[in-house]
Every structure is written in C-alpha cells, then in structure tokens.
C-alpha cells in the first residue's frame, strides 16, 4: 500500500518540485521521464449511476505524470484503469476531484473545450484499431494530419512505426499488429503532448504485441511523447519508467523501475 517513489522524480529541478523535496534525493538521468508535470490529478472520483445502482469506478485517485515518461498502468479488469485514462484524455469527466493538464483545469471543461483539448494535445491508441477500412494506411493517418496544427508527414509517421513499405495497403491487407502500428502512426502524427494507450496489445499475440510495444517505446524515446499504457499484463511493466498499480478504483502502488527492459526482453 506504500506509494514507493510515487511522487515521481526526474531531473530534480528544484523550482518544479519544490513541494516534493523527497524527489531531490534520487536524481535520474536525462531522458528517463520525470521533468515537468504534465498531468496532476487530485482526489478524482468517478461514480457511474445505472438506475438504482452506483458503481464507484474511481475512489479518490491522486496522480502526477511527468513530461517524457512512459508509465504503465497495471491492474485487474474493472479496477478503473480505463476510466482514469479516459478522464486524463478528456473523453470523460470526473464526478469529483480535479485534473490539470499543464496549467489547464480539465475538470470544468465543457464538451467543446474537451474536444479541442483532445484534438490538440492527445493521441489515443485502443485495443481495436478503429481504422477506416476503405482508406489506405496513408489515408487513415492523413485524416488526422489534415486537421492538425503542426503534423508530421503521414508517410513519415508510418515510417516511424516501421510501415514505410505499407503506405498504400488497406487495413484488410495488413496483419493485426500492422493495423495497430497504423493506429499508433495516426495517433502520433499530430505530435500530441501525450499518448494514451488502452490495452494496445490486448488483441495481439505475444510476438506481435512485442513489436507494438517496441514501437511505443521508440516513439516515447524519439519524440519525447509522454505515454501512459494500460495493461492487465504484469510482464509489460518492466518497460516503463514508472508503474502505477490500481485496484478497486484506487492507486495502490507507484514504483519507479530502477532498470527498464527493452520490450523485446519482456516475458508474459
Ligand atoms: P478497467 O479498465 O480497469 O478494466 P474500467 O475503468 O473500465 O476498468 O471500469 C471500472 C468500473 O466501472 C467497472 O466496474 C466497470 O464496470 C464500471 N464502468 C466503466 N465504464 C462504465 C460506464 N460507462 N457505465 C457504467 N459503468 C462503467
Ligand atoms: Mg479497461
């Protein structure tokens, strides 16, 4: 139940982490995540009301995510992982509590403001790829780049995920892992501040899943995109800078990996 290293860490910049002096004890190398606070959630609750029944999906979550880090959110089915990620991504709003993205309070945004927030700042990757079947890989990515402010070239985004030779393929002509890589290219092509991935390997076999995780680690590293990755698979946790464990709507542990593993080395 102890939030080991839970306050994060990082480059120990005193003016950023003044309120958390314990952090200064464990400076981390550059590129390990842990700079500026990107998300700060305080006392988040989420209650779904289904007729007479109330479901407490989140029961008081406090969380910070730092610029550039890759965080794995781990927990059993129903523990509130997706609810938390959806609130961070502006797809849902908390019942109570506050969530800030940089200096912006998302908790009181209306639908229109949340839509703009998502469009400008957030990339999503879900278990199912949600590609448009009648569009090629390149065109699927272009749907996003055409409305983004400072996008990558769609072909460059596809090259980043290792699909430079699949630009003109339709989804039906791609494997599951390749389709997920197109979905990742689509999510990162607008250069989002944060990449939120909900069970991105959930529909993939072991080997294909690893390739997708390698792509996510590579994007995190090369683009510096703050990345949160949901899984119920404990074997994936070793690739993260930090691991956040949830149970029954609460964070029960936050741990910093002293040694990270390459996705290729993971076992599950
Ligand atoms: P996880 O992603 O960890 O599996 P979720 O965040 O999806 O967990 O769900 C947490 C709890 O909230 C579960 O009991 C789930 O049934 C419930 N829940 C999630 N979304 C809704 C919803 N839209 N309406 C009602 N209940 C929901
Ligand atoms: Mg879920």
Image (cartoon, rainbow, N blue to C red):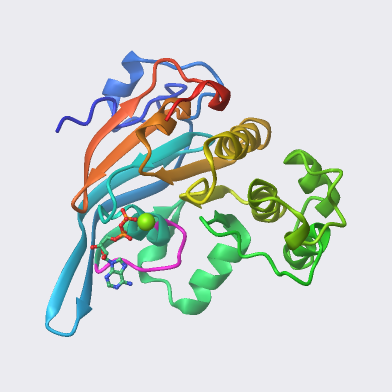
Quarter holding ligand 1: bottom left
Q: Answer left or right for 104 relative to 245.
A: right
In the image, farthest residue toward the bottom:
51
Q: Is residue 147 within the magenta segment? A: no
Q: Position of residue 248 (x, y in %)?
A: 18, 52
- The residue that appears at 50% across and 29% down in the rendered structure is 33
> Which span of residues is magenta-colored?
88-95
- The foreground one among 34 and 263 is 263
- The foreground one among 168 and 68 is 168
Q: Answer left or right for 266 relative to 5.
A: right
Quarter-wise, where is residue 118 in the image? Answer: bottom right
Q: Position of residue 45 (x, y in %)?
A: 22, 61
Q: Position of residue 86 (x, y in %)?
A: 41, 61
Q: Position of residue 27 (x, y in %)?
A: 41, 16
**Is 244 drawn above or below residue 27 in the view shown?**
below
- The residue that appears at 83% across and 45% down in the rendered structure is 156
- The foreground one among 52 and 92 is 52
Q: Answer left or right for 84 relative to 47.
A: right
- The residue that appears at 51% across and 37% down in the rendered structure is 67
Q: Is residue 93 within the magenta segment? A: yes
**Is 168 drawn above or below residue 55 in the view shown?**
above
- The foreground one among 140 and 25 is 140
**Is 147 drawn above or below residue 9 in the view shown?**
below
- The residue that appears at 36% across and 48% down in the rendered structure is 40
């Amino acid at each position: 139940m102890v939030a080991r290293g839970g306050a994060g860490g990082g480059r120990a910049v005193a003016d950023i982490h003044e309120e958390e002096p314990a952090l200064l004890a464990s400076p981390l190398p550059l590129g390990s995540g842990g700079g500026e606070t990107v998300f700060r959630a305080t006392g988040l609750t989420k209650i779904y009301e289904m007729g007479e029944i109330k479901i407490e999906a989140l029961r008081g979550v406090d969380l910070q995510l730092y610029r550039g880090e890759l965080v794995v959110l781990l927990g059993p089915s129903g523990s509130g992982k997706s609810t938390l990620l959806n609130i961070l991504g502006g797809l849902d709003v908390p019942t109570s509590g506050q969530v800030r993205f940089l200096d912006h309070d998302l908790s009181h945004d209306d639908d229109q403001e949340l839509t703009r927030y998502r469009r400008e700042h957030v990339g999503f990757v879900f278990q199912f790829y949600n590609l448009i079947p009648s569009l090629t890989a390149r065109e699927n990515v272009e749907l996003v780049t055409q409305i983004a402010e400072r996008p990558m070239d769609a072909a460059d985004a596809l090259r980043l995920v290792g699909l430079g030779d699949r630009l003109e393929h339709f989804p039906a002509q791609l494997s599951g892992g390749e389709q997920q890589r197109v979905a990742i290219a689509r999510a990162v092509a607008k250069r989002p501040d944060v990449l939120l991935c909900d069970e991105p390997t959930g529909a993939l076999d072991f080997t294909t899943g690893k390739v997708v995780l390698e792509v996510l680690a590579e994007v995190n590293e090369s683009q510096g995109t703050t990345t949160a990755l949901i899984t119920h698979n404990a074997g994936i946790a070793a690739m993260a800078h930090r691991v956040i464990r949830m149970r029954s709507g609460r964070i029960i542990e936050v741990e910093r990996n002293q040694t990270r593993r390459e996705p290729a080395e993971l076992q599950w």
